[in-house]
């Protein structure tokens, strides 16, 4: 239970200075009202276009999508789910999963997206900690996930999604009533959802589990108001209207994919082109075919696209006539990579910054900058600017006590506004530290500079927390430390996030061997790959005699980063490790 003092600080962090703006910032009582109005106003206009890995295309218009969500909500209601309950989704990007999200929000149910890149123990922790009652599981992952689910008491049923509803080994689960098929159950209900439970903007909409520097992942609780407010801010900043089309290539279990390219288009009455996965060879082709106006990416994808067009001799510069700009954030973008992409493809990058705890984005470069101004803020400060605070929140660079620092001074990026999370779920210690002075403390280091009109342009220079950010995903180094240290022959080892052109950061291991033990880098890499998913496993091992520590015994990982500089341009593939 949060203390009154901490609750007051959180409440303060979830408003903006101009109190008169707090009421009525979003003109909808809930996401369901927004969905209804969009279905009524746009009817047969396309809302969701989905491409699988084979290039198969599915299209749902606003009216049909709303009816699908109504059927899904009725189905969940028939299984006893009510406003305030929680469901989990375990899937790759799929149109069905988008239906699950919006159906849950229609009835005031909270969604817990589960990333399949997590190991089994973390998936089990997320499902147990969130107390999800129903799981939507893509059939492709049933063999791995069903044994985890059957040991979790809060889960009352699993909806398996996909074709072929009767494969082995599923009958053993069906006999116990644990497994149902989404497509089968959907046919049993009507399409109009009605409920006597009034959903409000304050109802919980998402619990996103994010890695921390210690222990288990933290559950970030976001409300329907958070989602609506961030979508409003994003759509207005980028000029996204009902005539625009956005494309999603990022995983929708992450807030970037969910908020920027699912909720924001719904808010604006725009269209979505959802891809099962990013594919370099289809990226520009699909933009051109579908006449996409805006895409949201992470820096890793810039590196992939540059490599793809560089290594395919004779391949022409791709067409992208409809594309206005590309949104980029969720990972460290270097000046060099940004400049190389913009000069190669002649597409402006609208760089930004945000966290799961602030729903998604909190700032962007202005889209109205001249070419000269844009290059100035992207290239002239050693770091590309993450831009200016967008209207639904305020930002500052603060010292430890929460006092705002002057331009050019480095401190912690702090945020307050309508997009700040409700709290960390069931984690009083984290809430107390994070909201210690009534703003959300990001744990990221940065500074700001003023333009000629007094606007603050923010920059991120590093992380006060010791997270490794690989491809826009936070990875806790301590989790990897434990695995490295368990490897036979290792005296001590630490995970080090080193700069990498493809993923922003990659995972390395700095290792001290037990004396007189024969131990190779391949031995350690093989051991770690058996105990960690590829994304978290070290790709390079460096041996040393001593691991640098502070006077209090804390590892100094940053001192080890220069040792991995030779692998900055290396692309590590699973099949080569």
Image (cartoon, rainbow, N blue to C red):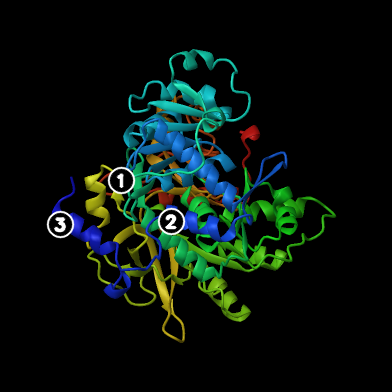
* Mark nearer the viewer, 1 or 2: 2
Between 181 and 425, the residue placed more toward the observer is 181
Residue at figure coordinates x 41%, y 84% from the top left: 454
| Marks 3 and 2, how far apart at CA | 34 Å
Q: Residue 306 vs residue 479: left or right? A: right
Q: Earlier in the sequence, mark 3 or mark 1?
A: 3
- Inspect this view and state whether residue 136 appears: yes
The N terminus - image quarter: top left
Task: Report x, y in % for residue 478.
Answer: 37, 39
Label 2 sits on residue? 33
* Mark nearer the viewer, 3 or 2: 2
Label 1 sits on residue? 554
Q: Earlier in the sequence, mark 1 or mark 2?
A: 2
Residue 152, placed above or below residue 427:
above
- Inspect this view and state whether residue 94 appears: no
Residue 228 appears in which quarter of the rendering?
bottom left
Task: Report x, y in % for residue 506.
Answer: 53, 46
Q: Circle 2: is it few (<14), some (14-19), or many (20+) Cα within 10 Å?
A: some
* Circle on res. 5: 3
Q: Earlier in the sequence, mark 3 or mark 2?
A: 3
- Do the residues bearing badges 1 and 2 touch, measured as CB atoms within 8 Å? no
Between 417 and 343, the residue placed more toward the observer is 417
- Do the residues bearing badges 3 and 1 touch, measured as CB atoms within 8 Å? no
Between 264 and 194, the residue placed more toward the observer is 194
Farthest residue, direction bottom: 452
Task: Report x, y in % for residue 518.
Answer: 50, 24
* Circle on res. 227: none
């Amino acid at each position: 239970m949060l203390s009154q003092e901490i609750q007051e600080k959180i409440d303060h962090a979830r408003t903006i200075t101009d109190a008169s703006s707090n009421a009525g910032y979003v003109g909808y009582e809930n996401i369901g009202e927004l969905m209804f109005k969009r279905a009524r106003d746009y009817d047969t206009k396309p809302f969701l276009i989905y491409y699988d890995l084979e290039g198969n295309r599915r299209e749902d218009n606003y009216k049909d999508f709303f009816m699908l969500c109504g059927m899904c909500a009725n189905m969940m209601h028939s299984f006893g789910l009510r406003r305030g309950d929680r469901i989990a989704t375990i899937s790759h990007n799929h149109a069905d999963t988008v239906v699950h999200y919006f159906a849950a929000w229609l009835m005031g149910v909270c969604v817990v997206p589960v990333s399949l890149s997590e190991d089994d123990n973390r998936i089990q922790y997320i499902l147990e900690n969130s107390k999800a009652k129903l799981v939507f599981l893509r059939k492709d992952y049933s063999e791995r996930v069903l044994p985890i689910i059957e040991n979790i008491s809060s889960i009352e049923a699993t909806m398996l999604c996909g074709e072929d509803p009767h494969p082995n080994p599923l009958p053993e689960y069906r006999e116990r009533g644990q497994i149902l098929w989404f497509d089968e159950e959907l046919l049993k209900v009507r399409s109009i959802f009605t409920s006597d439970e009034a959903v409000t903007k304050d109802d919980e909409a998402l619990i996103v589990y994010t890695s921390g520097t210690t222990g288990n992942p933290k559950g970030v609780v976001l409300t329907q108001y958070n989602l609506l407010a961030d979508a409003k801010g994003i759509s207005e900043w980028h000029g996204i209207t009902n005539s625009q089309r956005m494309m999603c290539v990022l995983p929708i279990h992450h807030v970037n994919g969910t908020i920027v390219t699912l909720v924001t288009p719904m808010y604006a009455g725009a269209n979505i082109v959802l891809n099962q996965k990013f594919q370099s060879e289809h990226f520009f082709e699909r933009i051109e075919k579908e006449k996409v106006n805006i895409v949201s990416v992470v820096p890793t994808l810039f590196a992939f696209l540059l490599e793809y067009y560089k290594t395919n001799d004779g391949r022409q510069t791709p067409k992208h006539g409809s594309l206005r700009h590309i949104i980029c954030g969720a990972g460290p973008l270097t000046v060099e990579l940004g400049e190389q992409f913009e000069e190669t493809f002649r597409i402006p990058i609208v760089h930004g910054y945000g966290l799961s705890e602030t729903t998604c984005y909190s700032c962007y470069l202005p889209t109205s900058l001249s070419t000269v101004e844009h290059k100035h803020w992207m290239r002239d400060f050693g770091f590309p600017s993450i831009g200016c605070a967008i209207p639904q929140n305020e930002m500052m660079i603060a010292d430890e006590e929460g006092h705002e620092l002057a331009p050019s001074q480095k401190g912690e990026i702090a945020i307050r506004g309508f997009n700040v999370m409700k709290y960390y779920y069931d984690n009083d210690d984290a809430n107390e530290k994070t909201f210690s002075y009534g703003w959300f403390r990001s744990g990221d280091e940065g500074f700001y500079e003023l333009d000629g009109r007094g606007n603050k342009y923010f920059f991120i220079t590093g992380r006060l927390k010791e997270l490794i950010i690989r491809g826009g995903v936070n990875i806790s180094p301590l989790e990897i430390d434990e695995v490295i240290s368990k490897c036979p022959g290792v005296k001590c080892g630490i995970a080090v996030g080193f700069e990498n052109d493809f993923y922003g950061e990659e995972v390395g291991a700095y290792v001290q061997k037990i004396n007189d033990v024969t131990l190779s880098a391949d031995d350690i890499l093989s051991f770690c790959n058996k105990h960690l998913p590829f994304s978290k496993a070290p790709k390079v091992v460096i041996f040393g005699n001593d691991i640098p520590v502070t006077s209090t015994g804390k590892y100094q990982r940053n001192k080890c980063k220069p040792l991995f500089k030779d692998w900055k341009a290396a692309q590590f593939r699973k099949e080569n490790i």
